[in-house]
């Protein structure tokens, strides 16, 4: 049998394919390949769904981070605090802006940025911005971070690449805060295109205008207002994403149901689960559990893979401060190194059946016997 990590066969079913092709034909008939009607529709609907005033589509989630930093004037000479557990892009964007990384450590139980570590870090480093990550779909403690950052005028870019469908601790959708929030529409994300795509959400008129300009070579109504880049989102991706918005809430609901069943069936197992309070907040992009240590992580992962369970050690085998090209930047990292060496991500997608969940649980329990 076995249980896969993703399930594109069900996600991209025959009906969806038919609907996508109809939209592609519409684009071809109009020769409107860039920033067309589907972009406009998606930007309006996605902003509404996430509780933001504006959604600006860009070419991918990494560009979204870089452009958000540029919108906040982060460049050479500036320092950005980066949450230690994330995909490499959350740190890479700082370097590509010509700024410097300062690592901020995470909560050892969740991998989410730790406000205490941030407080210690800003005593030693003059930060200009931070990048908290809603890792695996769980919300970073944004209100706490805002309280710490505001007196120091530190800007916040929330990396929400994994968090579409998730909610902040105040119960509002991720993307609804007054910070810039970035999303990725890479195909495996909760809301994925059929190629690359990304977006930045903001409530600010001024930042929305600036981001609109940056993504299109710094263009303004009177020529070029700044040095930007090309990070437009093409009409084909927008057509797919706009279509997928129709049932994304249903798929999110199914993810939460799967997570609830995992929580119940694994509550008596030796693996440590994420705190219960995230059950109805997380987007459940991944279902992470924690092994006792690195040896147990590798052994459990191997056991699951040998039984065709699509689990991955940590999803990110290293914390960001351990990645070679950026390992010399300063900051705290102890909890992140430990978290990355213990975390295992179980198969998670909206189409897992009760039998799949039981099979995964059975294999975990047989490992600990
Ligand atoms: C996927 C991802 C990104 C990058 O998005 P791309 O669209 O692949 O460029 C950034 N941050 C996190 C946390 C991600 O998961």
Image: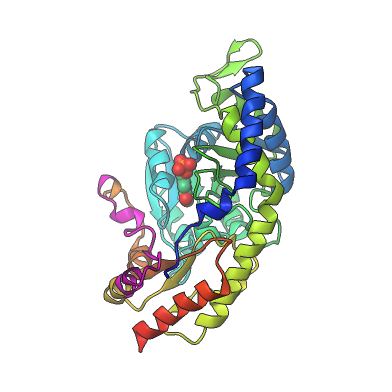
- Asked if residue 45 is among those painted magenta in the image, a careful observer would answer no
Which residue is at the front of the view, 200 or 165?
A: 165
Instruction: Give the quarter of the image for residue 86.
Output: bottom left
Q: What is the tally of numbered marks visible in this picture?
A: 0
The relative height of residue 177 versus residue 97 in the rendered view (above or below) is below
Q: Which residue: 37% across, 76% down? A: 291
The relative height of residue 173 versus residue 53 in the rendered view (above or below) is below
- Per the rendered image, the range of residues in magenta is 300-325
Which residue is at the front of the view, 313 or 103?
A: 313
The x and y percentages for residue 305 are: 34, 68
The x and y percentages for residue 4 are: 44, 62
The relative height of residue 85 versus residue 57 in the rendered view (above or below) is below
Which residue is at the front of the view, 97 or 5?
A: 5
Which residue is at the front of the view, 2 or 104?
A: 2
The x and y percentages for residue 208 are: 65, 31
Instruction: Give the quarter of the image for residue 283.
Output: bottom right
- Asked if residue 308 is among those painted magenta in the image, a careful observer would answer yes
Q: Quadrant of the C terminus?
A: bottom left
Q: Which residue: 57% across, 81% down? A: 264
Q: Which residue: 60% across, 41% down? A: 17
The x and y percentages for residue 349 are: 54, 61
Q: Is residue 167 visible?
A: no
Q: Is residue 122 visible?
A: yes
């Amino acid at each position: 049998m076995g249980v896969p990590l993703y399930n594109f066969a069900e996600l991209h079913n025959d009906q969806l394919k038919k609907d996508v092709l109809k939209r592609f034909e519409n684009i071809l008939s109009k020769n409107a390949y860039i920033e067309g009607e589907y972009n406009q529709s998606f930007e309006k609907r996605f902003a509404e769904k996430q509780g933001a005033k504006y959604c600006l589509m860009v070419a991918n989630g990494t560009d979204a981070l870089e452009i958000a930093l540029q919108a906040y004037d982060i460049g050479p000479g500036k320092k950005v605090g980066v949450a230690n557990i994330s995909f490499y892009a959350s740190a890479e964007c700082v370097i590509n802006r010509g700024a410097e990384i300062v690592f901020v450590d995470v909560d050892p139980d969740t991998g989410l940025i730790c406000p205490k570590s941030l407080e210690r870090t800003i005593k030693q480093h003059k930060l200009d911005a931070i990048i908290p990550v809603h890792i695996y779909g769980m919300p970073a403690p944004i209100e706490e971070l805002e309280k710490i950052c505001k007196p120091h005028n530190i800007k916040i870019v929330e990396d929400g690449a994994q968090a579409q469908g998730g909610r902040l601790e105040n119960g509002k959708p991720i993307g609804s805060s007054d910070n810039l929030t970035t999303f990725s529409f890479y195909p495996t994300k909760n809301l994925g295109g059929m190629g690359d795509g990304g977006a930045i959400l903001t409530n600010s008129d001024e930042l929305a205008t600036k981001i609109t300009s940056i993504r299109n070579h710094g263009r303004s109504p009177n020529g070029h207002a700044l040095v930007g880049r090309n990070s437009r989102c093409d009409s084909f991706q927008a057509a797919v994403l706009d279509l997928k918005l129709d049932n994304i809430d249903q798929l999110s609901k199914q993810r939460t149901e799967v997570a609830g069943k995992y929580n119940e069936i694994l509550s008596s197992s030796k693996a440590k689960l994420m705190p219960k309070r995230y059950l109805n907040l997380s987007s459940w992009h991944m279902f992470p559990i924690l092994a006792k240590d690195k040896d147990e992580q590798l052994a459990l992962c191997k056991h699951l893979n040998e039984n065709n369970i699509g689990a991955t050690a940590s999803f990110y085998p290293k914390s960001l401060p351990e990645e070679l090209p950026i390992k010399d930047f300063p900051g705290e990292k102890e909890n992140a190194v430990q978290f990355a060496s213990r975390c295992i991500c179980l198969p998670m997608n909206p189409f897992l059946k009760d039998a799949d969940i039981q099979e995964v649980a059975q294999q975990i329990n047989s490992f600990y016997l």
